[in-house]
Image (cartoon, helix red, strand yellow):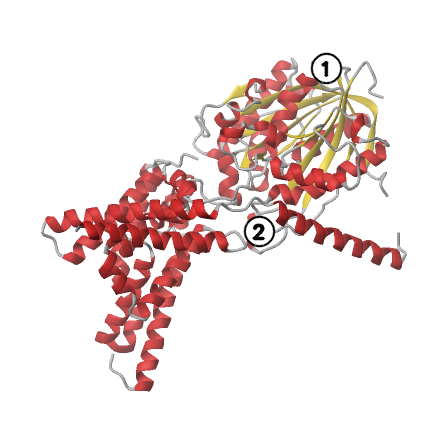
């Protein structure tokens, strides 16, 4: 268990550090939206080649918490749905796999914005 | 003033001056403190993931299924990211940690809540709800489109090579 | 061509008073003691940041008239602007005053534009008194030009912090200690800077252009001035301005100062310094006239600098044109030259 904590920290931090390098080394200003898009696509490509689940096996939440984990679950969802529904799975798999996180973000985000105020 | 020779000389002088200025502003730009930024991103990003792992372990101890524990841990981080955004702390964390607090799922929640809070003054439907996805929208667009395209590529590949889905 | 658009005000124009209102962070800076009113939060009793900025302008104008012991009826013209779409902030402040109004937009050079126009109108004899107002607010600007304020992103060290402040000045033909002598209308200058975080770099060439044109028209050198005060170049823009001017002029030294640098202390975490229309407006209305009356500076050149960008132009990858307007002030009595 202690080793799991270690790997969660190192892999999770490592993925963030990698994104920071990409952010700082790009010659023009990159917004957080750009970085998040890149990270999700990165997770999808690793997932496509079946590599990302190794990372999850090693690091647990260290690979699930960074948004590349979201990208990976989209692609894994697509592949699983294709196994069931064939070509239609391309459309049905992604968002159903990411549904819990996405719904939570929308609902929690909505109520946070209703009840809280920006501080500037 | 309208002498074409003088005009073209003026234009080339102007172009040279602009080029010189462009190199001046590059030379005088303070370098980005890469090592410091990367270290902070690593530590803060790692800490957020570690926190997720702690939630996960606690939930497994409660006897929940593995997949449920992962999802619930992510939900807690989303909740924390949203609330810290609304209380005005997440932007300060982001200033220090950069990608370290952008890349974890709590940062995704931050990019949803921040515009929603900001445009609350323009109404709940046309402001808050409409602007909720100004920054997170691209992530979903590229995520969904990317996964569908990669799925399609796999489908075609398997059809060509005769493999099974 | 260098003499064009440098105006010498024929009828003498005087500074008749100033008032400045600022936000909490600005209030803690070196300029704090010179503000008439300091808000304790970015959002006052109003229910939005835009309304708070309007309240700051309203308070600055009320203070100005109160200090000058004037009523709306005795001011001929109100000129003013801010950074928010369609000048709504200023329009809502102007609606509460019974003074004919001209809305101005030259980004952060709006105060300079207003002083120049008001002086020209008084100097030509059209009006006797004019109030000029300009403001900016950190949160209204951030959300219009950049990102939501609560977004956890990182900004480069060369970006600037939009000042939350409003400044209002009264110009009049009734004699007073500080006189406005002349002014130069700037040209829009574009050196191809595209980084919207690098406003100091975008604005420095415009400031250099206007300063050179003004000095040529006045047949003066920087040594003739006690202070050449730019609006909001920040530390980086000021350094670039000096680098540009050193090629053309002698005496490019500490007499060149910047309101964006003056606004905050080193430890206030504002990147390269302050920016925004309220930056120059509050320093020029709050601090500078008092310093001149005290005798600290006798001949001063104010150079308002504005980056003429919008969220749309930046999004489309356009470069950032900039403008600078100059106004020359002198204390009456001993001529500087």
The x, y position of residue C26, in whole percent, is 53, 26
Q: Are marks 1 and 2 in contact (CB under 8 Å)?
A: no
| Element type where label 2 sits in the image | helix
Residue C182, by quadrant, is top right
The residue at the point 44 percent across, 44 percent down is B36
| Element type where label 1 sits in the image | loop
Tell which subunit mark 1 falls on.
C
> Could you tell which of marks 1 and 2 lies nearer the N-terminus?
1
Packing grade of label 1 (10 A; few <14, some 14-19, many >=20) is few
The residue at the point 23 percent across, 56 percent down is A60
As drawn, C9 above or below C147:
above
- CA gap, disc 1 and disc 2: 43 Å
Residue C226 is left or right of residue A52, and the answer is right
Extreme-right residue of the structure:
B3
Q: Nearer the viewer, residue A55 or A120?
A: A55
Packing grade of label 2 (10 A; few <14, some 14-19, many >=20) is some
Point out the image quarter for the C terminus of chain A. Answer: top left
As drawn, C180 above or below C238:
above
As drawn, A115 above or below A76:
above
Q: Say whether mark 2 and mark 1 are on the same chain.
A: yes
Q: Which disc number belongs to residue C314?
A: 2
The residue at the point 21 percent across, 53 percent down is A4
Look at mark 1 in the image and give the residue it sits on.
Answer: C295
Q: Is residue C106 visible?
A: no
Residue A76, by quadrant, is bottom left
Residue A70 is left or right of residue C25, and the answer is left
Residue B25 is left or right of residue B148, and the answer is right
- Count every numbered label the image shows and give the total: 2
């Amino acid at each position: 268990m202690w080793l799991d904590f270690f790997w969660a920290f190192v892999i999770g931090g490592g993925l963030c550090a990698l994104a920071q390098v990409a952010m700082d080394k790009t010659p023009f200003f990159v917004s957080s939206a750009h970085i998040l898009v890149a990270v999700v696509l990165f997770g999808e490509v690793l997932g496509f080649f079946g590599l990302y689940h190794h990372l999850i096996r090693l690091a647990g939440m260290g690979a699930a918490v960074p948004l590349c984990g979201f990208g990976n679950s989209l692609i894994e969802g697509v592949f699983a749905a294709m196994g069931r529904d064939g070509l239609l799975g391309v459309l049905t798999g992604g968002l159903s796999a990411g549904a819990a996180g996405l719904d939570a973000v929308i609902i929690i985000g909505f109520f946070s914005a209703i009840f809280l105020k920006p501080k500037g | 003033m309208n002498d074409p020779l003088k005009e073209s000389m003026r234009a080339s002088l102007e172009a040279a001056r602009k080029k010189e200025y462009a190199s001046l502003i590059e030379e005088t730009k303070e370098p980005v403190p890469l090592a410091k930024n990367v270290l902070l991103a690593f530590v803060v990003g790692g800490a957020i993931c570690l926190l997720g792992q702690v939630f996960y372990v606690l939930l497994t101890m409660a006897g929940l299924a593995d997949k449920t524990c992962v999802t619930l841990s992510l939900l807690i981080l989303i909740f924390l990211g949203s609330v810290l955004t609304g209380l005005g702390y997440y932007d300060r964390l982001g200033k220090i940690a950069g990608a370290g607090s952008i890349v974890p799922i709590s940062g995704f929640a931050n990019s949803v809540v921040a515009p929603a809070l900001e445009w609350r003054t323009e109404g709940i439907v046309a402001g808050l709800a409409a602007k909720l996805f100004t920054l997170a929208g691209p992530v979903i667009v590229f995520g969904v489109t990317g996964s569908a395209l990669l799925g399609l590529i796999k489908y075609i590949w398997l059809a060509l090579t005769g493999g099974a889905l | 061509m260098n003499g064009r658009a440098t105006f010498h005000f024929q009828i003498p124009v005087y500074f008749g008073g100033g008032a400045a209102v600022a936000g909490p962070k600005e209030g803690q800076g070196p300029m704090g003691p010179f503000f008439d009113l300091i808000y304790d939060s970015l959002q006052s009793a109003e229910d939005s940041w835009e309304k708070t900025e309007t309240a700051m302008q309203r308070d600055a104008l009320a203070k100005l008239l109160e200090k000058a012991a004037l009523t709306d009826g005795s001011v001929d013209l109100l000129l003013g602007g801010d950074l928010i779409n369609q000048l709504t902030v200023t329009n809502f402040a102007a609606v509460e005053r019974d003074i004919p109004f001209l809305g101005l937009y030259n980004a952060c050079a709006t105060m300079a534009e207003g002083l120049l126009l008001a002086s020209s109108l008084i100097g030509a004899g059209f009006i006797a008194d004019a109030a000029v107002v300009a403001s900016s607010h950190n949160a209204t600007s951030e959300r219009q030009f950049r990102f939501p304020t609560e977004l956890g992103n990182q900004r480069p060290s060369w970006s600037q912090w939009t000042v939350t402040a409003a400044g209002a000045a009264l110009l009049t033909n009734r004699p007073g200690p500080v006189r406005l002598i002349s002014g130069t209308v700037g040209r829009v200058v574009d050196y191809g800077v595209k980084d919207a975080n690098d406003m100091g770099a975008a604005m420095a060439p415009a400031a250099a252009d206007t300063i050179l044109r003004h000095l040529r028209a006045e047949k003066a050198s920087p040594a003739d001035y006690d202070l050449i005060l730019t609006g909001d170049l920040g530390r980086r823009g000021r350094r670039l301005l000096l680098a540009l001017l050193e090629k053309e002029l002698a005496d490019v030294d500490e007499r060149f100062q910047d309101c964006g640098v003056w606004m905050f202390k080193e430890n206030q975490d504002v990147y390269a310094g302050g920016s925004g229309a309220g930056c120059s407006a509050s320093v020029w209305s709050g601090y500078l006239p008092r310093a001149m009356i005290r005798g600290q500076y006798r001949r001063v050149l104010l150079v308002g600098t504005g980056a003429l960008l919008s969220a749309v132009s930046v999004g489309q990858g356009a470069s950032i044109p900039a403008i600078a307007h100059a106004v020359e002030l002198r204390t009456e009595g001993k001529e500087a030259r």
